[in-house]
Amino acid sequence: MSLQQGLAIVLQVKDHGDSDKIVTLYTLEYGKIVLIAKGAKRSKKRFVNKLELFSLLAIHFAPSRHSSLMRLDQADLLNPFPRLRENYERYIAASLLCELVLHWTREHDCDEELFRLLVWALEGLALAGGAVNRTIIFFHVKMLDILGYRPDLTGCLDCGVLGAPGVVYRFSTMRNGLVCSRCESQATGNTSQPLSIQTIQLLRRAQDMEQGKLERLHFSPAATREAVALLKRYDNHLLQREVQSWSFLG
Amino acid sequence: MNVVPPALSRLIADLNRLPGIGMKTATRLALHILRRPASEAQSLARDLGELHRSIRLCSGCFAFAETDPCGICKDSERDGGLVCVVEESADLMAIEKTGAFKGKYHILHGVLSPMDGIGPEEIKADALLERIRNQQVREVLIATSSTVPGEATAAYLIKRLQEEAAVKVTRLACGIPMGMDIKYADELTLSRAIESRKDTCS
């Protein structure tokens, strides 16, 4: 069977038996794929240092004749992002980005834009001065956009107004958008924390902003807390599972 | 119709729960045990039954041991001022085999892995800090693996030890394995080896 090749980010690595590893990758050409790397645990040359979390690889792989798992044949390390392992906060952030891609994508569902966004975010986290929480929020908002789950933050879903004085806005995960305190019926029981207008506007700007202009976004600690809580709740609701890395984010 | 006798089927299912043992290997092991003399199977069953009764975690270093404190923690010949931090008991055994380390150990029983829900509270990090504060420890050697989770765990421990304890912290050296030709070393290992180069005149 012919070898296929591509660029990939390592999302997850699991030991398999005494000598093999099961690697989940997000690739530029094939989306999320799961491969078996035969002999990877004992490899002294072919896979050593390469099948590590967050690494950007150039890979060669082939469908297996005996199982549904594809076989990883070769991996060349393009960028190991060493700074992500030298700092606990950045390690958690990078783990979160990879876990999000792991759970939000399906196997073989290819999305070039998402791959480039992930590489860009990991590069940003690896930079000494990179703002960790801002990168996470921006990545998440953009990822939802790419995958077709963009939350509607333009105004209240019922009255269409945003910023009316004295009105409280909450995000409804059921309706995928904002609901104001004037329109919210008591029966819906939306118990989420209110979102400040500042946070809503920052998230809206992030939805429409290009990656290169990220420095223009300034999240206050309160806005960061609100945005993180909203995204975490949105993940739990739509994925119907907990994204573990959220709990370690400072 | 089930052709496998229930007792054999139960053993296969039990073995299948072990890490790295698939259904085929579990069946092969179960049939091997069945073919060997009954005394061997009884001895295996006795040893398995004894495991949790006789082995506990050492309250000093968290190693598996039959006594508390364990043999290494009790050994007055070993340097109590030097503590080597490892991920697992198997790492302790690997370091002990070298005969090069004469200090004591601290076993974390894991590494930080946010995706698996393993944070600082799940590894024995607080116990290490407490031990350093309460005992006369002058150096902590961090000997976690050079994998991403191992390095991140080392970075976390180094930061906490530097902030919360007045102790010298060292990291296991990382570089070219003995007998390896430099041209076959990967870029990351080679760059680490250059960064950690040693002054031969000292």
Image: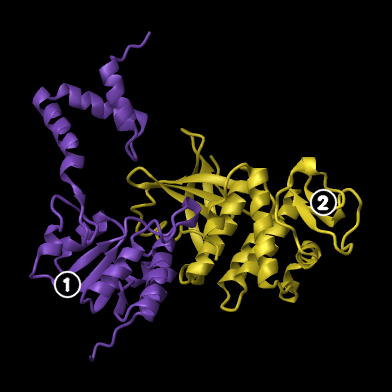
Residue at (16, 38) in percent of width and height: B50
Question: In this image, A134 relative to A78: left or right?
Answer: right
Q: A36 or A167: nearer the eye?
A: A167
Residue B69, by quadrant, is bottom left
SS state under label 2: strand
Residue at (85, 59) in percent of width and height: A167
Q: Which residue position holds label 1?
A: B80
For the C terminus of chain B, the image quarter is bottom left
Q: Which residue position holds label 2?
A: A179
Residue A155, image x and y in percent? 86, 56
Residue A59 numbered tag: none
Residue B114, image x and y in percent? 49, 56
The amino acid on which the numbered mark 1 sits, given as a three-letter code, is: Gly
- Tell which chain the image draws in purple: B
Residue at (80, 62) in percent of width and height: A204
Residue A237 visible (yes or no): yes
Residue B179 visible (yes or no): no
The reply to the same-chain question for discs 1 and 2 is no
**Could you give the CA–CA distance between mark 1 and mark 2, rounded to whole angstroms?**
62 Å
Circle 2 chain: A
Q: Colour of chain A?
A: yellow
